[in-house]
């Protein structure tokens, strides 16, 4: 009887080998379960990211590369690297050849055509309601002394007068004279001391293959070379116009910019007081600005620097005849006694030390425009 009990007990005992197999199976099941949970968690996270993915939001089709072995991946990367090197090398060669081709003088027409296209697009979207951003005065930076063209040494601001020609009825003003010419400093071949040294890049404004500038004409002539009728204004005449302040960003074509506070008179207010001639001979009226002659020429007293502006840009509400900068009167280095400020244009258009304003229906000369740059120079 006792032997039978022992025999029955032994039958219910699991052999040691089978127990090990069972334990291993349990471990495999647990590992598979953990792996499945990890995959599900990863998929859940992927779905969450996919919802936020830009391509998903835009409805773009997403394709994934097939799974590769290590050897296949190495072969694919090697093939892609060779192809990328060949394409990159060919692109570099074509880029160098294209650059040399574009630098040939006979290719200047490409630049000119591009400039004209840019100007046409800018004028198409131009609106006097589109304003440049204005900033808090705490953002004001230091405006470097830059660009000495037309800034002759020995200039006497007390003897300065603003010549104005091309008005509708100049004889109606007490500032009218039969001869607006007057003597002024004429050292326009040498820049003011230190200005060239302060250029961030002295070659930044030298356009390749720029044509030689044409000989002097009325829109390049110095103050002493203008024996013709017109107005001679003083700074007090400008200050008698409504005073406007704005804090805007001046952008240089060399690539730097700074925030500056300006004070002066809107050019549009200047035009209301001193109305330009019209193309159809009608009485000038700012509400019919399209009747005005189409351009404005501005020249420094020595004739060393000159810009041309289209009438819509001049009438923009942020185009100023400025006489103060950062709460102080303009310094000689920054264009005293009077300079142009127009944040819709690059700095090369914002002429310092204005000596003459001429209203004309012919596109006027422009200093940097004659040296290979965009005449319009808007941004």
Image (cartoon, rainbow, N blue to C red):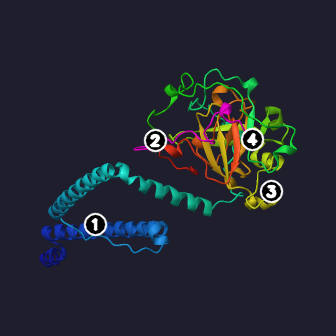
For residue 248, side relative to residue 122 (left or right): right
Q: Residues within 10 Å of mark 2 (few under 14, many from 20)?
A: few
Q: Please check the rendered image and state whether residue 219 is part of the magenta-colored stretch, yes or no.
A: yes
Q: Secondary structure at mark 1?
A: helix
Q: Alpha-carbon distance for marks 2 and 3?
A: 38 Å
Q: Alpha-carbon distance for marks 3 and 4?
A: 18 Å
Marks 1 and 4, the one that precedes in the sequence: 1
Q: Which residue is mark 1?
A: 31
Marks 3 and 4, the one that precedes in the sequence: 4
For residue 26, side relative to residue 259 (left or right): left
- The nearer-to-camera label among 1 and 2 is 2
Marks 4 and 2, the one that precedes in the sequence: 4
Q: Which residue is mark 3?
A: 286
Q: Alpha-carbon distance for marks 3 and 1?
A: 85 Å
For residue 15, side relative to residue 202 (left or right): left
Q: Which residue is mark 2?
A: 212
Q: Secondary structure at mark 3?
A: helix
Q: Who is closer to the viewer here, 203 or 93? A: 203
Check if mark 2's residue and mark 3's residue have beta carbons within 8 Å: no
Q: What residue is drawn where x is 84% and y is 41%?
A: 241
Q: Alpha-carbon distance for marks 4 and 2?
A: 28 Å
When asked about the image quadrant of residue 239, the answer is: top right
Q: Alpha-carbon distance for marks 1 and 4?
A: 92 Å
Horizontal and vertical percent for residue 31? 28, 66
Marks 3 and 1, the one that precedes in the sequence: 1
| Residue 161 vertical position relative to residue 58 in the rendered view, above or below | above
Q: Secondary structure at mark 2?
A: loop
Q: Which residue is mark 4?
A: 164
């Amino acid at each position: 009887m006792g032997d039978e009990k022992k025999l029955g007990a032994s039958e219910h005992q699991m052999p040691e080998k089978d127990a090990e197999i069972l334990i291993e199976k349990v471990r495999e099941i647990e590992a598979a379960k953990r792996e499945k949970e990890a995959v599900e968690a990863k998929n859940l996270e992927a779905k969450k990211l996919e919802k936020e993915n830009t391509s998903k939001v835009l409805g773009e089709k997403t394709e994934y590369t097939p799974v590769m072995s290590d050897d296949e991946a190495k072969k694919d990367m090697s093939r892609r690297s060779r192809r990328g090197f060949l394409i990159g090398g060919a692109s570099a060669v074509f880029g160098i050849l294209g650059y040399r081709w574009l630098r040939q003088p006979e290719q200047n027409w490409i630049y000119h055509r591009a400039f004209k296209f840019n100007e046409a697009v800018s004028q198409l979207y131009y609106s006097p309601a589109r304003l440049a951003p204005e900033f808090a005065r705490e953002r004001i930076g230091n405006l470097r002394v830059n660009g000495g063209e037309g800034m002759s040494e020995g200039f006497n601001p007390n003897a300065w007068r603003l010549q104005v020609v091309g008005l509708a009825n100049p004889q109606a003003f007490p500032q009218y004279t039969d001869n607006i010419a007057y003597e002024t400093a004429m050292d326009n071949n040498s820049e003011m001391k230190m200005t060239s040294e302060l250029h961030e890049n002295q070659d930044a404004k030298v356009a390749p293959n720029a044509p030689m500038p044409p000989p002097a004409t009325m829109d390049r002539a110095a103050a002493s070379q203008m024996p013709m009728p017109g107005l001679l204004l003083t700074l007090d005449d400008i200050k008698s116009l409504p005073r406007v302040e704005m804090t805007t960003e001046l952008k240089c074509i060399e690539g730097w910019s700074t925030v500056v506070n300006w004070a002066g008179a809107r050019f549009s207010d200047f035009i209301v007081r001193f109305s330009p001639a019209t193309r159809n001979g009608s009485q000038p009226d700012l509400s019919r600005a399209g009747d005005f002659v189409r351009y404005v020429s501005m020249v420094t007293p020595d004739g060393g620097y000159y810009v041309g502006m289209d009438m819509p840009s001049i009438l923009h509400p942020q185009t100023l005849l400025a006489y103060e900068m950062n709460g102080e009167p303009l310094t000689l280095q920054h264009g005293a006694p009077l300079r142009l400020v127009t944040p819709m244009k690059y700095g090369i258009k914002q002429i310092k030390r204005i000596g003459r304003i001429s209203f004309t229906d012919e596109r006027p000369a422009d200093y940097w425009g004659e040296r290979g740059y965009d005449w319009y120079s808007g941004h």
